[in-house]
Image: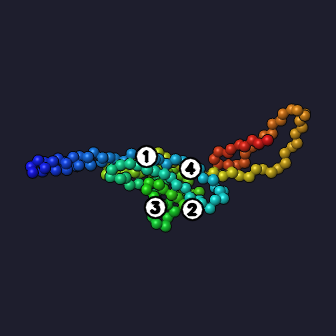
Amino acid sequence: MMLLWKLLVLKSLMGCLAESSVLQSPVFTKQPGSIVFPVDSQENNRDVVFSCEAQGSPSPLYRWKLNGTAITPKSGSHYSLSGGNLRISHLNKDQDAGTYQCLASNSFGTIVSREASLTFAYLGNFKTHRRNSVSVREGQGVVLLCGPPSHSGAVLRNVQG
Ligand SMILES: *[C@@H]1O[C@H](CO)[C@@H](O)[C@H](O)[C@H]1NC(C)=O
């Protein structure tokens, strides 16, 4: 009987040790990346999601900052938080462009993610004025220059033909 009692005490002690050894301050398992959103995107879906995930015990709570100011995802706002992920719906260039950071906290501390930017890309129309004609001898090469229209974000050049 005594032995059984000792075993029980030992077992519960070990249980406590095992539990306390998993207590852990948060560590990121996923951090947000920068997003470029096309301004005149025809999609109805004008949402973006910044992802953030951290491990820790107790489980971390998440907060987000935009340009260093705390974001409050209350109901009815265009922010929503799902786990650590921040969804921004009905994107607005003036309200939402900036630098985002995720914060994960538990009783052992707070960690701050890398900065992820949200930028809005646009591409103006090409100028439609006529080019001067270019004369070339048959069989020779020619270079026609093409300046990109006004834009924000990288412009890809597609070469065809
Ligand atoms: C955040 O900072 C950037 C760079 O200074 C600025 O262009 C942007 O408008 C700011 N965003 C907000 C929502 O204040």
Upstream in the sequence, badge 2 or badge 3? 3
Q: Which mark is residue 29?
A: 1
Q: In this rendering, is residue 22 above or below 80?
A: above
Whole-number angstrom distance, CA of label 1 to CA of label 3: 22 Å
Query: Residue at image x 88%, y 32%?
Result: 139
Q: Nearer the viewer, residue 95 or 141?
A: 141
What residue type is disc 4 on?
Ile
**Residue for badge 2:** 90
Q: Quadrant of residue 155?
A: top right
Quarter holding the C terminus is top right
Residue at the outermost bottom position: 76
Q: Nearer the viewer, residue 116 or 159?
A: 159
Is label 1 or label 3 in front? 1
**Taking the image as drawn, is residue 5 in sight?**
yes
**Residue for badge 3:** 73
What residue type is disc 1 on?
Thr
Query: Residue at image x 59%, y 57%?
Result: 93
